[in-house]
Amino acid sequence: MSKQRVLSGVQPTGNLHLGNYLGAIRNWVEIQQQYDNFFCVVDLHAITVPHDRATLADNTYKVAALYLACGIDLAYSTIFIQSHIPAHSELTWLLNCITPLNWLERMIQFKEKALKQGENVGVGLLDYPVLMAADILLYDTDKVPVGEDQKQHLELTRDIAVRVNDQFGSKDKPVLKLPDPLIRTEGARVMSLTDGTSKMSKSDPSEMSRINLLDPPEAIAKKIKRCKTDPVKGLEFDNPERPECNNLLTLYGLLSGKPKSEVAIECQDMGWGQFKPLLTETTIEALKPIQEKYQMIMSDRDYLKSILRDGRQKAEAVANETLARVKSAFGYSTPL
Ligand code: TRP
């Protein structure tokens, strides 16, 4: 029996941080052997809000290098850049034309981002989930590892696929495969270092709110030293009045590889003065091998480009086949 297919992606906006790693990429690494995986850098999504042309290409390569540095293994996974495969844009157009406008207007992330953008809301921001649906559906994806915040987009993807199948497929011959979300079991929602109730995020204006995967040890030490805590002695998980405490213990557990039960006992009598240096040390040690591997990969751009070229070829073969199937189902003539 052939392996089920997994697809996921991260946007190339700035530095990846611990939230991206612990919440996404590390989970991909853990499951990759069981699946046939496609991991893309979604640089078309990156222009749905105003972007910087000077850094787009570089950030895209950096994220691809970080995938490899974090342990994505080419024996099980294909890494590619979304914009290198025209089928993503083309399927998006086809899906646009069968997606009701009000499905997109309902999306929570659109509403939140649109509010932030004020006057400057492009059509692309509204269309973002259709592009994501195209990413997923092009690869006949079985499972999509996503966080809580992307679940609504995955449901939309399924709704779009059902609509295409209803309108253009037959019962025994669906045009598109319905993907399922792959929600991780161990909760790894990494929160901001300056506010334990909001997610660690690239768009937070304060650098102190996040630890980037490429932060040098001094920056990590400084951020943890200054991070928000509380005046209570003795550390504990899951106390709703102590969100920062829960977040920092969770980080410690994930980065040290110790189970929650062990961390709870180890830290139950600690004060912050004892815990913070421990978390600092653990974070620096956990990121060290990733940073070393990243430097190695980035020092050989030709190697990185050859990986991405291979990835593009493998991905494109699959994507083009699906695109041709959809166009034919829509009734298009075959290109002459
Ligand atoms: N929207 C996703 C996010 O911000 C990124 C993404 C784009 C994605 N295309 C995808 C994730 C396809 C999974 C599958 O996290």
Image (cartoon, rainbow, N blue to C red):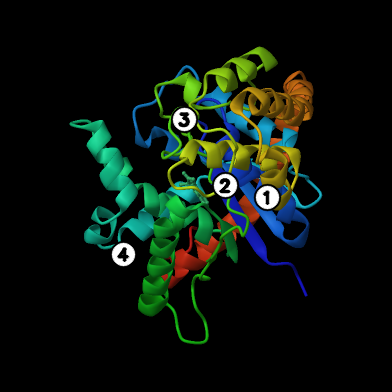
* Residue depicted at x 66% and y 29%: 275
Picture disc at residue 202: 3
Determine the residue positioned at 52% across, 24% down.
227
Name the residue rendered at 58%, 36% in the picture: 248
Q: Circle 2 is placed at which residue position?
A: 237
Q: Toward the viewer: 96 or 147?
A: 147
Q: Earlier in the sequence, mark 3 or mark 4?
A: 4
Q: Is residue 323 left or right of residue 101?
A: right
- Residue 260 got which mark? 1
Q: Quadrant of residue 51?
A: top left
Q: Which mark is residue 301?
A: none
Image coords of residue 83 (percent x, y): 51, 39
Whether residue 314 is visible, yes or no, is no
Identify residue type, mark 4.
Answer: Ile
Question: Residue 19's spot in the image, x, y percent?
Answer: 56, 38
The answer to whether residue 31 of the structure is visible from this angle is: yes
Residue 157 as seen in the image, left or right of residue 36 = left
Residue 59: x, y in percent? 55, 25
- Above-or-below relation of 74 to 165: above
Check contact, mark 2 vs mark 4: CB within 8 A: no
Question: How far apart are the alpha carbons under marks 1 and 4?
Answer: 46 Å
- Mark 2 near mark 1, Cβ–Cβ under 8 Å? yes
Amino acid at dot 1: Lys
Q: Nearer the viewer, mark 2 or mark 4?
A: 2
Q: Residue at x 68, y 39 (%)?
A: 267
Helix or strand or loop: what does disc 3 sit on?
Answer: loop
